[in-house]
Image (tube, grey):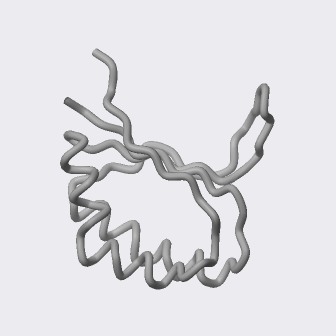
Amino acid sequence: MTAYWLSVYREIFDQAKVDAYARLAGPALEASGGTFVARGLPEQTYEAGEATRTVLIVFDSVDAARAAYDSPAYQEALAALDGGARRDIRIVNATS
């Protein structure tokens, strides 16, 4: 079943580290089968109203998304991020 990886950047502390992470993370996640669906700041917010960077990636399954996170290439990207941001990452099944 299709799964979605949702990253919400709660706070960015070091933009240079976020940029270094992004240069490595995009190719790593795509090589693991991920397809970027959306990324950037919201065009509109409701309720909590948090205008924070959000990334949505689709994978073939929850297992594929987990494997992407655990992959050596993505772990290298995380090392580059090195505390440059506080994020919330969730992997959820698509509904049928």
Above or below for 48 versus 8: above
In the displayed structure, 42 sits above or below 8; it is above
Depth check: give the residue in front, 57 or 82: 82
Left or right, 77 with respect to 11, comes to left
Q: In the picture shown, does residue 48 fall above or below 65?
A: above
Q: Position of residue 35 (x, y in %)?
A: 32, 49
In the image, what residue occupies the spot 71% across and 51% down?
52
Residue drawn at 60 percent across, 78 percent down:
83
Q: Quadrant of the N terminus?
A: top left
**Residue 82's spot in the image, x, y percent?**
54, 82
Query: Looking at the rendering, in which quadrant would you find the C terminus?
Result: top left
The x, y position of residue 9, in whole percent, is 63, 57
Number of numbered discs overlaid on the protein picture: 0
Relative to the observer, which residue lies in front, 86 or 20? 86
Residue at x-position 44% and y-position 83%? 79
Residue 1, above or below 90: above
Q: Residue at x 37, y 35 (%)?
A: 92
Q: Is residue 59 left or right of residue 36?
A: left
- Apparent side of residue 39 relative to residue 73 in the rendered image (left or right): right
Query: Residue 50's image quarter?
Result: top right
Percent coordinates x, y for residue 21 in the rendering: 49, 76
Q: Quadrant of residue 16?
A: bottom right
Q: 39 left or right of 85?
A: left
